[in-house]
Image: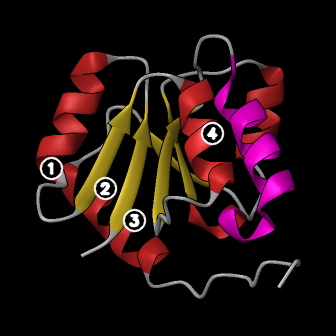
Amino acid sequence: MSRILVIDDDPGVLRAVYRILKDHDVMALNDPELALERLVSGEYEFNVVLCDISLPRLSGLALYEKATAARPELSSCFVFFTGNGDQAAIAFLGRPDIRVLHKPFETAELLETIKTVASLPKEPDATE
């Protein structure tokens, strides 16, 4: 079982992903600033972070940059989902080290991505 953080401002997406991942330990948040606090505090450890790229107040791209600046080992945990994006988001999502699920995604695709990301070795924290 993986510990997964899901961040999306659409309640329907949060509910659907939460149901699909019922066999995992899931925290679903619609507030990207709260999600960032949870990620950088170290109080919660996540194997996978599913993050929408288009979020209010703090984009998925900005959340990723802030979270990985504070905790570089989180970079391999992120998977972004999107239905669209601006030029900066499109360029970011095109990077080879970034994982993306395009909405609407299939249940099997989501589950396979979770399995893959959760099994990746995590980079050690540079402060350790």
* Contact (Cβ within 8 Å) of mark 4 with mark 2: no
Q: Position of residue 88 (x, y in %)?
A: 83, 27
Q: Position of residue 25 (x, y in %)?
A: 25, 61
Q: Which labelled disc corresponds to residue 113?
A: 3
Which image quadrant is residue 61 in? top right
How would you rate the neighbour count of disc 2 (Cα within 10 Å): few for under 14, some for 14-19, many for 20 or more? some
**N-terminal-most mark, 4 or 2:** 4
Can you identify the residue that label 1 sits on?
20
Tell me the amino acid under the disc marked 4: Glu
Number of the front mark, 1 or 3: 1
**N-terminal-most mark, 1 or 4:** 1
How would you rate the neighbour count of disc 1 (Cα within 10 Å): few for under 14, some for 14-19, many for 20 or more? some
Q: Quadrant of the C terminus?
A: bottom right
* Contact (Cβ within 8 Å) of mark 2 with mark 3: yes
Dot 4 falls on a residue whose secondary structure is helix
Q: Position of residue 58 (x, y in %)?
A: 69, 20
Tell me what residue is drawn at x 19 percent, y 55 percent.
Answer: 21
Alpha carbon of mark 1 to alpha carbon of mark 3: how far? 13 Å
Q: Which labelled disc corresponds to residue 110?
A: 2
Dot 3 falls on a residue whose secondary structure is helix
Q: Position of residue 7 (x, y in %)?
A: 45, 35
Dot 1 falls on a residue whose secondary structure is helix
What range is drawn magenta here? 58-74
**N-terminal-most mark, 4 or 3:** 4
Alpha carbon of mark 2 to alpha carbon of mark 1: how far? 9 Å
In the rendered structure, the answer to whether residue 13 lies left or right of residue 33 reads left
Tell me the amino acid under the disc marked 1: Ile
How would you rate the neighbour count of disc 3 (Cα within 10 Å): few for under 14, some for 14-19, many for 20 or more? some
Alpha carbon of mark 1 to alpha carbon of mark 4: how far? 25 Å
Can you identify the residue that label 4 sits on?
37
